[in-house]
Amino acid sequence: MTHASLKYDDTIAAIATAYGAAGIGIIRISGPDAALIADQVFFSKKGHKLKGQETYRVSYGLIKDEKGQAIDEALALNMWAPHSFTGEDVVELQCHGGAVVLKKVLDLVLAAGARLAEPGEFSKRAFLNGRLDLSQAEAIMDLVNAKTETALTAAANTLQGLLAREIRQCRQELLEVIAYLEADIDFPEEDFERLHQGEILTRLEKTRERIQQLLQTFSSGRIVREGLKTVLIGKPNVGKSSLLNTILKTQRAIVTDVPGTTRDTIEEYYNLGGIPLVLIDTAGIRQTEDVVEKIGVEKTKDVIKEADLLLYLLDSTTGLTGEDREYLKELPKEKTMILANKVDLLAGGENAEKYEEDLARQLRGYRLLFISATEQIGIEELEKAIKDQFFVHGWENKDQAFLTNIRHKRALDQALKALESGRQGVLEGTPSDLVSVDLQNCLEYLGEITGETLDEEIIDQIFARFCLGK
Ligand SMILES: Nc1nc2c(ncn2[C@@H]2O[C@H](COP(=O)(O)OP(=O)(O)OP(=O)(O)O)[C@@H](O)[C@H]2O)c(=O)[nH]1
Ligand SMILES: [Mg+2]
C-alpha cells in the first residue's frame, strides 16, 4: 500500500504549544488553504499577503478580528508544500503565549475556514504524504513524552529513521530472495542464474540475526521508555516510605512510626543517571481487617505482578522473621532484591559483622544490601546495583536503533516467526512457492513497523493516541 497519493482537501489548525502562560504560543495551520486562511487573520506591517510569498519567510504583523480590532502582535512563518512538516502548505502564527490569546486566534482561524485538527493529525498527514514513516511518527510522541535524556536519545534515534533504515535493509534482503524464488516458480525450465540453497540460507540467516538483535534491545528499550517499575515492599514500619523519600530527596510520602501509615500506592519518577525509575511505594503485604488497608494490600499484589524490580525491605533490628519468609516465598526470586534497613540501629563491631553474615546465609540466592533509609547508608550502592542489573551498555551509542515500542516489538516477533518457518522450509526442501509465502508474510510484518503494510484503521488508532497539535 502506498499513501503518497493521498491528498487532503481540507485545511486543519490547532494550538501547537503547551497550554498555559508562556513567552510565545504557536497556531499551526496546514492544508491547501493555509495561506488564504492565514491572510484573513494576519496582517503584515509591510502590507504583503502570505499567499505568494517565497517559502520559509517570516512576516511580522498583527492578528485582527472580524471587526479589524487588533488581538495580538505575531510572526507568521510560511512553509509551502512539499517542504514542510506535513508535506502540505503550512503557516505557523507565533503569537504571545497566553491561553486566552491563543484560543481567540485559533477561533479566528477556524472562522476563516480551517477545521480543528484531531489529535495527531499533523503527524498523520506527514506520514501519509511520505514525510515520515510510521516508526518516526510514533517517535515524535515518545520524544514529547520523554522523561529522561536516555529516553530522549532513543526516541530521537528512531525519529532520525535508524529503526526504519534497519527494517528497510531487512526487507530489501528478503525481497531479493523472494524474487529468486518466484523466478524459480514462474520459469522452472529456464536457464538463469539461480541462488543455491546455501546462499538462500545464508541470506535468511543474516536477516534473522538482524531481527534478533533488534528484539534484544527491547527489554532495555521499554525500560528507557516507560521506566523501570520498581516496587518497595515489606512488612509495616520497615521503612519503605522513608526509602522512597530518601531516593527522591523530598518528603513525598508520609512517614510515621505507626504501622500501616501508607495505605495507597504512591508512584513517582526518579532519574537514575539518565534512566527513569518508576518508584512505587506500597501499603506492604500483610493480613488486615481494615477495609481501606485491605484494598491497598490487594493493589500491592497487582503492582508486584507488573514490577520489573522488587525491593523487599527488612528491619535489621528484628532480622528475617517468619512472616518475611512467608512473603518472600510468594515473590519471584529473580526480580527481588533484599534491603536490610535501619542498619544504623545495629550496634557496630564484631556482632554486626556476624549478623550480616548470618543474614546473607539465610538469604542465599538473593541480592542483599544493608542500608539505612533515614541515615542515608548504602543508598549509592543500591543505585549502582540497580544500574548494573538492568542496563546493558550501549545507550551511549548514538547510532544504535532501539526497539522501544510494543507495537514494533509484536510485529518483529511475528516477522521472526514467519522467517523461521521459511528458513525451516528451505532446509527441508519444501517447494519454493510455500517458502515464498512465509517470506512474504515476514515482509508484511516488517512493513507494519514502518507503516508500509498497515490497515488504515490501525493507522488511525495510532495517530489518535497523539496529543492535540502534534
Ligand atoms: N533508625 C532508623 N529509623 C528508620 C529507618 N528507616 C525508617 N525508619 C523509621 O521507621 C518508621 C517507619 O518508617 P516508614 O518509612 O513509615 O515505614 P513504612 O515501611 O513505609 O511503613 P508503612 O507505610 O506503615 O507500611 C519511622 O519512624 C521511620 O523514621 C532507618 O534507616 N533507621
Ligand atoms: Mg509507608
Image: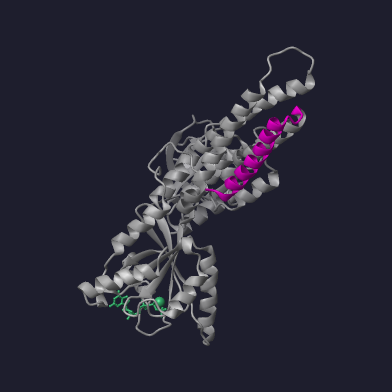
Could you tell me residue 295's position as x and y percent?
54, 79
Q: How is the image coloured?
A: one colour
User: Could you say which is closer to the camera, residue 416 or residue 78?
Assistant: 416
Q: Can you tell which quarter of the image residue 194 is in?
A: top right
Could you tell me residue 235's position as x and y percent?
43, 78
Residue 121 shows up from this direction: no
User: Could you say which is closer to the camera, residue 167 or residue 30?
Assistant: 167
Q: Residue at position x 63%, y 24% from top?
A: 198
Could you tell me residue 12's position as x and y percent?
60, 45
Q: Residue at position x 46%, y 36% from top?
A: 47
Q: Is residue 385 above or below residue 207?
A: below
Q: Is residue 119 above or below residue 343?
A: above
- Indicate whether residue 218 is drawn in magenta: no
- Indicate whether residue 407 is drawn in magenta: yes
Give the farthest residue toward the top.
191
- Tell me if 324 is positioned left or right of 433 in this view: left
User: Could you say which is closer to the camera, residue 360 or residue 53?
Assistant: 360
- Tell me if 420 is positioned left or right of 364 in this view: right
- Tell me if 187 is positioned left or right of 442 in this view: right
Could you tell me residue 27's position as x and y percent?
50, 48
Q: Residue at position x 35%, y 57% from top?
A: 385
Q: Residue at position x 69%, y 44% from top?
A: 456
Query: What secondary structure is the magenta-colored segment mainly?
Result: helix
Quadrant of picture, ligand 2: bottom left
Q: Is residue 188 above or below residue 293?
A: above
Residue 217 shows up from this direction: yes
Q: Which residues are magenta?
A: 404-432
